[in-house]
Amino acid sequence: MTTKIRILAVDDEPIIGQSIAYNLEAPHRKISVATNGREALKVASEEKFDLIITDLAMPEGGGLQLVREPRQRKYDGKIVVLSGNLSQENHGVYEELKIDEVVEKPCIMEELREIVTDLEKDFELTPTE
């Protein structure tokens, strides 16, 4: 039995979601990908994730909805938001929702890897098969 950190990467551009998964791939991580907020909420209701990495602007339930709903259900995992257009209003909302990191798009994958590695220090690993 091994332990893995479960990560959900969400972006409406499939190539970006796959790129995040590829760049974060590691033996101690299990990475799932969703292409919109609605799909991500469904996946997150079926499996517990330690970290959600989400785009802000997406069809069918954007990043704000994807952050707000889990926090209302007492999700205590880490959340990283990716966005190419962050307003002061968004920063205030994300602060209220206890977002762990906000990354400006286009993001450099090395920067995202460093953020995830830093956040992993706080994770409690869950046994998986």
Image (tube, rainbow, N blue to C red):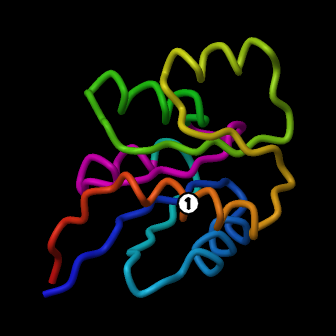
Image spot of residue 58 (x, y percent): 67, 41
Vertical position of residue 34 compared to residue 40: above or below: below
Residue 108 falls in image quadrant: bottom right
Q: Which residues are magenta?
A: 39-60
Q: Is residue 102 left or right of residue 31?
A: right
Determine whether 97 is above or below 24 in the image.
above
**Residue 105 x/y as whole percent:** 83, 49
Q: Nearer the viewer, residue 9 or 12?
A: 9
| Residue at image point 49% right, 32% down | 67
Q: Is residue 4 above or below residue 1?
A: above
Find numbered disc 1 in the image and state the secondary structure of the residue it sits on.
helix
Q: Which residue is mark 1?
A: 116
Tell me which corner region of the image, top left, top right, bottom left or bottom right, holds residue 35: bottom right
Image x and y of residue 19, in percent: 69, 74
**Quarter in which the C terminus is drawn:** bottom left
* Residue drawn at point x = 44 percent, y = 44 percent: 78
- The quadrant of the rendering that contains the N terminus is bottom left
Q: Quadrant of residue 100?
A: top right
The residue at the point 73 percent across, 71 percent down is 15
Amino acid under disc 1? Val
Residue for point 45% across, 71% down: 31
For label 1, the crowd category at 10 Å Cα-Cα, with few meaning under 14, some 14 to 19 and many 20 or more, is some
The answer to whether residue 32 is left or right of residue 10 is left
On whether residue 48 falls in the magenta region, the answer is yes
Residue 35 belongs to magenta span: no
